[in-house]
Amino acid sequence: MAKLPGEFDLIARYFKPLARRMPGAVGLEDDVCTWSPQADQEIVLTADALVAGIHFLPDDPADFVARKMLRVNLSDLAAKGATPIGYLMTSAFSPEIDETWVKLFCEGLAADQDEFGLSLMGGDTVATPGPLTLSLTAIGTVPKGRAPRRNGARPGDKVLVSGSIGDGALGLKVLRHEFLGLEEAHRRHLANRYHLPQPRVDLGRALMQSGRVTAMMDVSDGLAADLTHIAEASQVSATLRASAVPVSEAAAAILADDMSWLPLVLTGGDDYELLLTAAPDDVPALLGLAAELDLPLTEIGEIEKGSGVTIVDRDGTPLELGAKGYRHF
Amino acid sequence: MAKLPGEFDLIARYFKPLARRMPGAVGLEDDVCTWSPQADQEIVLTADALVAGIHFLPDDPADFVARKMLRVNLSDLAAKGATPIGYLMTSAFSPEIDETWVKLFCEGLAADQDEFGLSLMGGDTVATPGPLTLSLTAIGTVPKGRAPRRNGARPGDKVLVSGSIGDGALGLKVLRHEFLGLEEAHRRHLANRYHLPQPRVDLGRALMQSGRVTAMMDVSDGLAADLTHIAEASQVSATLRASAVPVSEAAAAILADDMSWLPLVLTGGDDYELLLTAAPDDVPALLGLAAELDLPLTEIGEIEKGSGVTIVDRDGTPLELGAKGYRHF
């Protein structure tokens, strides 16, 4: 780590300020952080690893890398209605990482700590001859026993999704210099949605508090795959109406030009929206909650007995995932 | 990851069984784990990253890698008197990692989960073109406000250390084919101490419960460096009597042959013993606690006003760390 100050200097200069609102982190001068939830709360824990060149582009700006890493984990907390508290982060810095990179990286963390109200709690900083590798454990709290799980979907439930689907996967293509004919504002929107997902923390908490959600998770593997996860965990089947899936204006412009991008929208992932199920009678109340937060929440399908997920076209024709993507029967 | 099953298969086959005693992990079928401490407890969190070729040898057996990773973190918990509860782990698997390796790795985790009474709570499994990189966040509990910190050492306190110091660093040299003239039993002892440190969980808890410890941490960076950490955090100075530092029979045999290995013993690290301070009147009670657990606890120095750490020889002569290691004035 020739380009970097020593580990202790790096921590004192850049990471310690990120822990100043967490008294139990003792300025990162101990090996541990102590903290306790309120008596009526349980903690919610989630961890993710990101490798440069696989989970983000090696030339992505450091502050975007930091914020995306935090937000990917905050999205997991949001799907359980949890309030973010803090995170532990381990960084394996590759040889090309210099102090400027770390400074910008920590500025990104600071910005999102302020935006989402959480704090660094601890971690570890090491060197690697391989690609930059980051690992983050995020901690939140939720009223005991109230976190919606994946396995509660029941036959008759409706399937809903927040925001819009497909922007993350299309945004990655924009960053890889595809869709060059697309309007510049649309290109910027898609790239931004890839770089900076919006974890639905407030919506997740409101949905959890309503007690009307039977299953919830965030869309990270792709809408089709994640609905399959809910169906499998709940031992039910699901129908997904492709035409009902909400897309941004930018994604709509791409699909209007070439509908063959639809499979990517439905399976591309990196959406970080909330996917949930609820009884039909509860849907209007949930839509009302989302409207109060000015966030779209859209009914996109139904839960039935059985197993598997069927994706249907506007006219009810099933679409099937073939070896090279979705195709009509 | 051509040699590995898919991520979901890998999780179902090898990682899910490690989470079966943690109901809030829901068989790793959700993105999060929920859990709450008892009302009188706070949680203690610590994280470490390990990179193959830097923190362990690339050809170290997978079960030893797993157990060492767990134990390094358990040692941090032990130094706060915490009872281990669980851990989240992210694994970035390099191309040469195959299913046999993962199976053995998880057998190592299972063995130490049983030995130390903790459970896998969650994590993430990704591929990397770089070296195998592991990150672990460990969670324990301690009665609220009772965790000994680094910053409580007071002038007049005695410095104590558990077990024996130097085996880890000497063990690494044995594994690198040094000390070939050493008795085979000694070589095995040292190699084993490097591979499989013994986190002092029971001793740490007993010391915390006694309320007689003013500062405590585990020895991972080296005895001299870690005593410096306590002195700096506590704004005091410390004297370390080199001749009082407890060493194993194997280390004693090496030092009897060549005292120039003493600096490595005092600075090599990877000891995972407990380093603590206490008022002189409290020392006998602490020694009694350790004796009940059949663990050596040895007085090795004193805390004074001022700053810095002085290492003294048997006759009180200061030893100084030169550019090439310790040297006499």
Image (tube, coloured by chain):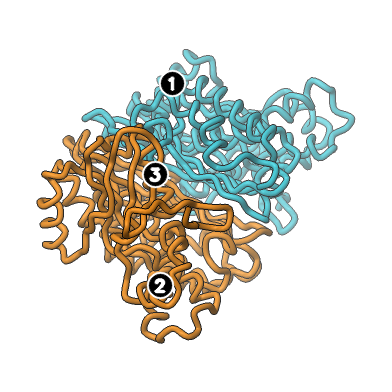
Chain colours: A orange, B cyan
Q: Which residue is mark 1?
A: B284
Chain of the residue displaying label 3:
A
Q: Is residue A258 left or right of residue A252?
A: right
Q: Do circles 2 and 3 both sit on a common chain?
A: yes
Mark 1, secondary structure of its residue: helix
Where residue B198 sits, quadrant-wise, is top right
Residue A227's spot in the image, x, y percent? Answer: 37, 46
Chain-order first, disc 2 or disc 3? 2
- Tell me the crowding category of disc 3: few under 14, some 14 to 19, or many 20 or more residues within 10 angstroms, Cα based: many
- Residue name at image x 43 percent, y 23 percent: B286
**Residue flagged by tag 2: what amino acid is it?**
Leu
Figure check: B289 above or below A230: above
- Tell me the crowding category of disc 2: few under 14, some 14 to 19, or many 20 or more residues within 10 angstroms, Cα based: some
The residues tagged by marks 2 and 3 sit, at their Cα atoms, a distance apart of 23 Å
- Tell me the crowding category of disc 1: few under 14, some 14 to 19, or many 20 or more residues within 10 angstroms, Cα based: few
The residues tagged by marks 3 and 1 sit, at their Cα atoms, a distance apart of 68 Å
Which mark identifies residue A309? 3
Residue B84's spot in the image, x, y percent? Answer: 42, 29
Which mark identifies residue A255? 2
Q: Is residue A171 left or right of residue A3?
A: left
Figure check: B297 above or below B217: above
Chain of the residue displaying label 2:
A
Which mark identifies residue A124? none
Residue A132's spot in the image, x, y percent? Answer: 58, 61
The residues tagged by marks 1 and 2 sit, at their Cα atoms, a distance apart of 77 Å
